Amino acid sequence: MVRSLKNIQKIKRKNKGSKTKKGESSSIPSAPAQVWQPGVDKLEEGEELQFDPSAYNYLRAFSIGWPCLSFDIVRDSLGLVRSEFPHTVYGVAGTQAEQASWNHIGVFKLSSISGKKREVLPSKSADNETDIDSDSSSDEDEDEADESTQPILQLHKVAHQGCINRIRSMTQKPHICATWGDTGHVQVWNFTSILNALAESETDASRGGNSIHHQAPIMNFGGHKDEGYAIDWSLVVPGRLVTGDCRNCIHLWEPSSETWNVDKNPFVGHTASVEDLQWSPTEADVFASCSVDGNIAIWDTRLGKSPAVSIKAHNADVNVISWNQLASCMLASGSDDGTFSIRDLRLIKGDSLVAHFEYHKQPITSIEWSPHEASTLAVSSADNQLTIWDLSLERDEEEEAEFKAKIKEQANAPQDLPPQLLFVHQGQKDLKEIHWHQQIPGMLVSTAADGFNVLMPANIETTIPGAAS
């Protein structure tokens, strides 16, 4: 399992997403760009990595002070599907501070997210040179990004004793959030007043940022025998929650009026730490778990405290799982050995494995299906890469040759990449968790030891009606 943040220290300045590179060069070189593959290529003396703005519709970094191991995007009332800039994002995040009493839950609003739709291939200029080969155009891109895409961060801090291992906002009541603390306590919070204040406030970045709210949780459960990381709200039954700990126990929470009844008799089936939990997106009583024991288990709360099905999923710790909301038969899992797999739950009693990828070189730290495209998922790894995959893609040699001919003067494309690999994002150190925005197609937020990134890759398309094409 890989969870803790290394070399924790307060982030004193903002890491600009448009400067995620080694060195201080201010423009893209005029020579054709060389695509750099982490874990494969090495930087020679004098070489540097540069961010290519044409690869993104939007990319920015921000920080809430201390590094965050976990965060969640909070659903809002600004529109179910939003495709036009500027965008606004609400979120909650839990810190990993040096001292227990310094920790807080950050409730934030990121507004004035103003990017632009870019072409997957840079357009040709009048003199038949590509934009990516022009020093002046790249300078203009960076200047434009600095001036027009700088988001406004508004932050309220709620005191929390101890580091926050994981935090999740309830889908049906987004102002209700649950936290798993390293103290061994699971707490539920009501952030209605803070979220309302953020929604009503003007775009004043300093408002609420320096004060600490001392607010009591509305529920505090200390019945786990150890700390944990696994937690998930049901998508079908509002308020239903499951929490799993490092002692292999899973507890079911049932909502009751203004509180919760937690079943003191745990679900037990794993032989080691429960690392992640996911409710079925369609079945009220079914959830999945994964563990350091290498297994994935499917549970039915109506059938007792043992798993309905348990399968050996990986040869190492299974760190994370994600249940596909659009294709509910598909479950993705990521392992400590850097591999991730896709299983068809309709075949769970036989050979359910439908895809297995060995691209990443370090443990998988987060995995999540896209809420807008059933075949697309994002993966983060301790190798400092965030990758996006489309499982519906297959290698087409004729189409591939045509595409390579188009880009031959713009970049030296690497060979033998998986055809399902859509996008590779780099620049963050010690990536920990990623989430798609449920209401903004193509937007991802990621957290790492050096802060957050908000990104919208230029080649992620959506078929949702009304979205930009």
Image (spheres, rainbow, N blue to C red):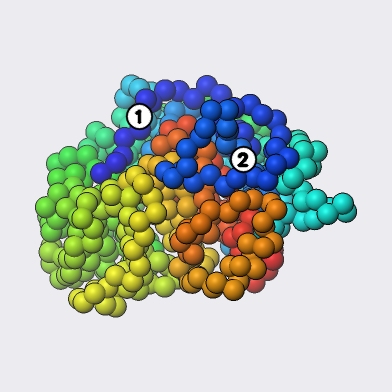
Q: Position of residue 33 (x, y in %)?
A: 64, 45
Q: Quadrant of the N terminus?
A: top left
* Amino acid type for the residue under numbered disc 1: Lys
How many residues crowd mark 2 within 10 Å: few (<14), some (14–19), many (20+)?
Answer: some
Residue that appears at 61% across and 64% down:
461
Name the one closer to the observer, 288 or 186: 288
Disc on the earlier residue, 2 or 1: 1
Cα distance between the residues tagged 2 and 1: 25 Å
Furthest toward the right, the residue is 126
Instruction: Give the numbered dot on residue 467.
Output: none
Q: Which residue is mark 2?
A: 51
Locate residue 280 relative to residue 206 in the image: left or right. Answer: left
* Amino acid type for the residue under numbered disc 2: Phe
Q: Secondary structure at mark 1?
A: loop
Q: Position of residue 28 (x, y in %)?
A: 69, 38
Residue that appears at 47% across and 48% down:
386
Locate residue 107 relative to residue 269 in the image: left or right. Answer: right
Tell me if residue 77 can be seen. no
Q: Position of residue 247 (x, y in %)?
A: 14, 45
Q: Secondary structure at mark 2?
A: loop
Residue that appears at 20% across and 76% down:
349
Q: Is residue 364 above or below residue 256?
A: above
Name the one closer to the observer, 310 or 164: 310
Q: Which residue is mark 1?
A: 6
Q: Quadrant of residue 172?
A: bottom left
Tell me if residue 133 can be seen. yes
Q: Quadrant of residue 49?
A: top right
Residue that appears at 42% across and 43% down:
39
Q: Is residue 140 above or below residue 319?
A: above
Q: Position of residue 234 (x, y in %)?
A: 35, 61
Locate residue 454 relative to residue 236 in the image: left or right. Answer: right
